[in-house]
Amino acid sequence: LEVGGKVAHIGAICKGAGMIYPNMATMLCFIATDVAITPELLRRALRRSVERSFNCISVDGDMSTNDTVIALANGQAENQVIADEATACFQNFSRALEFVTQDLAQKIARDGEGASKFIEVRVRGAASWAEARQVGRAVTRYNLVKSCIWGEDFNWGRIAAAVGASGVDLDPATCSIALGG
């Protein structure tokens, strides 16, 4: 990625996974970057990217006993230190970090114990990211949705039931469900 006119890098590796839900998985994730960034802003970027990646995956619905995501930054890219959340440099770094963690989260879920299918739930039109996440989590943990996906009997009614049971206020008349596009 480019940060303040300097080329920078993010490298990461994960090991896991079983017991994937509600947050992260039984996993270890180590992220390293050569970006110069304050520890507080690195923490904020990491917290947000983990919330939108590892904390959104589910395989077996079991809570993990131990999860770790660590990010290290050494400043070797020689960019001006990112010290302000409002800067384009911070936004670029945050987007790149989120891309890396989302890619790894999907790989963790695909490789989860007993996983034979992979689905991605996309919620559009929610009032907030938190409500979208709540709906998505309801769909991914709903056993009848899991069984129809595993059995390759794609029943949109089960998905609608999961969405309706999510606790989010919605109008069923405006709800649209698409499978495989």
Image (cartoon, rainbow, N blue to C red):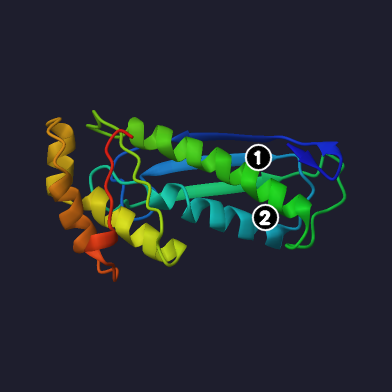
Residues under numbered marks 2 and 1 in contact, where contact means CB atoms less than 8 Å apart: no
* Pick the front one: 57 or 181: 181
* Pick the front one: 153 or 151: 153
| Residue 32, label in figure | 1
| Residue 80, label in figure | none
Say which quarter of the image contains residue 78: top right
Q: Earlier in the sequence, mark 2 or mark 1?
A: 1
Say which quarter of the image contains residue 146: top left
Q: Which residue is mark 2?
A: 42
Kind of element beneath mark 1 = strand
Q: Looking at the image, which residue is at 85% across and 38% down?
A: 6
33 lies above or below 110: below
169 lies above or below 38: below
Residue 108: % across, % down: 39, 36
21 lies above or below 33: below
Kind of element beneath mark 2 = helix
30 lies above or below 166: above
Q: Looking at the image, which residue is at 45% across and 61% down?
A: 129
Quarter in which the C terminus is drawn:
top left
Residue 18: % across, % down: 29, 40
Residue 11: % across, % down: 63, 34
Say which quarter of the image contains residue 12: top right
Tell me the crowding category of disc 1: few under 14, some 14 to 19, or many 20 or more residues within 10 angstroms, Cα based.
some
Quarter in which the N terminus is drawn:
top right
Residue 30 is at least partly visible in this image: no
Q: Looking at the image, which residue is at 23% across and 44% down?
A: 60
Residue 168 is at least partly visible in this image: yes
Task: Identify residue type, mark 2.
Answer: Leu
Tally of marks: 2
Task: Identify residue type, mark 1.
Answer: Ala
CA–CA distance in space, label 2 to label 1: 11 Å
Q: Looking at the image, which residue is at 85% across and 45% down?
A: 4
